[in-house]
Amino acid sequence: MFASSFGQGPVIEQLRSELLNQELPQALLFYGQRYSGRMTAALETARILHCREGAAPACKCRECRTSRTLDNPYTMVFANRDFLSQFDAASAGFAVSRNQESRDLLRRSVNLLLKRFDVMWAGKHDSQQKESSRLIEEIQDQLAEFSSLDDRLVSKQEGVLAKIRKLTAKLDETIKSGNLPVQAVRSLQSWLSTKPGDVHGTVIMEGVEYFHDPSKNALLKFLEEPPKNVTAVLLSEGRGRIIPTILSRVRTYAFLQRSPEEDARVIRDVYYHDPDEFDSLRTFFLTKGGIDCRTLRDDMQFLVNSLVYPDEFDHDRFIGLLARIDEQGMLKKAFLEIIEVLRECRDSRLIDGDLEYRCWEVISEAGSRSSEKHQRESLILESCWYKLAELFNFRGVKV
């Protein structure tokens, strides 16, 4: 159990004990920083709950096989993440070592995106739904072809994966918000209520802190009266970002930041790459996604430093940074990097936790706006920076 959950000994031992003793509650919250393995642990929890044959790591039962690739229909996942970086990293791992584990991981990285649409279109019949449905069908056809190919047919596999990458990029572009619609929550609950009584259902919702208030209220009702034999796992980057009413209805599990050694273990044992080439999992994923990590970090460090130390602001560099954001379409990654830099500033006591949280709220709002409105990414980032500057100015920092 939890063979791939590296670096999370205490919380994994707690989960293992509760599962073996059948003491796991129906509602859980896994919280921790990015790349701490929350989703991996949530998916493994789902596999164990589905399995009827002891849930050994190498179990070959149908439930375990479909769970490893996220093809199990009773595992519902609403993920909020960089899907393309996940796919690129999994593809890179498969290219190094063509085995069943890397093949499953690659298929799972695609299904993580497709699962998001299982509940998104409840009650909707618009042109966007039709386009997304078309893309999903094409991706599923390509996945089926990929699964049927012999690993010796390398060029054919690479051709199919290139098609999947192109289609998933288009599907990813249709995601307009990190919010789970209210109707989707209600439809999810209704659908789970009709499942066979002896089948366990698992619902995984990532980024619940980004849900709008009506969706949070619908989620609260779902947690208050969950369908029988269903487990809900919420994922968040911070326990303090969850509203108290939801927090009171879940059992919390803290995922700590992995050590460099554990990051290296994931890079080596899961993705089959030399960990000496990367200083962290973050660097690995961004690099495989075609991002210059050093430039991205330097740019976002400059933005935050210009808030903390206003005298360091360089207008020409600011304009050049905004131009790169438009050229490379990196707004989402930029926002995530700013959040990481702000966290480091808090750890260094350059800012306090309250200011960090207020900044996170501004960034989250800007991220939602970027998905819902077709504006240039540079304009959204610039507007966000000025709002952040107002927060720092309110605290006595001149801008």
Image: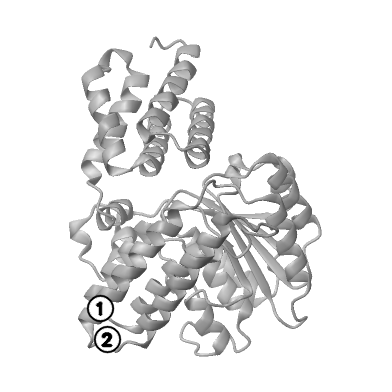
* Residue 29 versus residue 145 in the image, above or below: above
Q: CA distance from mark 2 to mark 1?
A: 10 Å
**Residue occupying image coordinates x 68% and y 73%:** 201
The one nearer the camera, 25 or 148, is: 148
Question: Label 2 sits on what residue type?
Answer: Asp
**Residue occupying image coordinates x 25% and y 49%:** 291
Q: Position of residue 81 (x, y in %)?
A: 46, 53
* Residue at the extreme right: 225
Question: Label 1 sits on what residue type?
Answer: Ser
The one nearer the camera, 77 or 133, is: 133
* Residue 21 versus residue 7 in the image, above or below: below
As drawn, the label of residue 151 is 2
Which of the two marks, 2 or 1, is nearer to us in this view? 2
For the C terminus, give its image quadrant.
top left
- Left or right: residue 87 versus residue 396 is left
* Residue 54 versus residue 179 in the image, above or below: below
**Residue occupying image coordinates x 44% and y 52%:** 173
The one nearer the camera, 113 or 35, is: 113
The answer to whether residue 204 is visible is yes
Q: Position of residue 315 (x, y in %)?
A: 25, 17
Q: Which residue is mark 1?
A: 97
For disc 1, the neighbor class at 10 Å (few under 14, some 14 to 19, many from 20) is some
Q: Position of residue 321 (x, y in %)?
A: 26, 30
- Left or right: residue 268 versus residue 121 is left
What is the secondary structure assignment of the residue under circle 1? loop
Q: Position of residue 222 (x, y in %)?
A: 76, 57
* Residue at the extreme front: 127
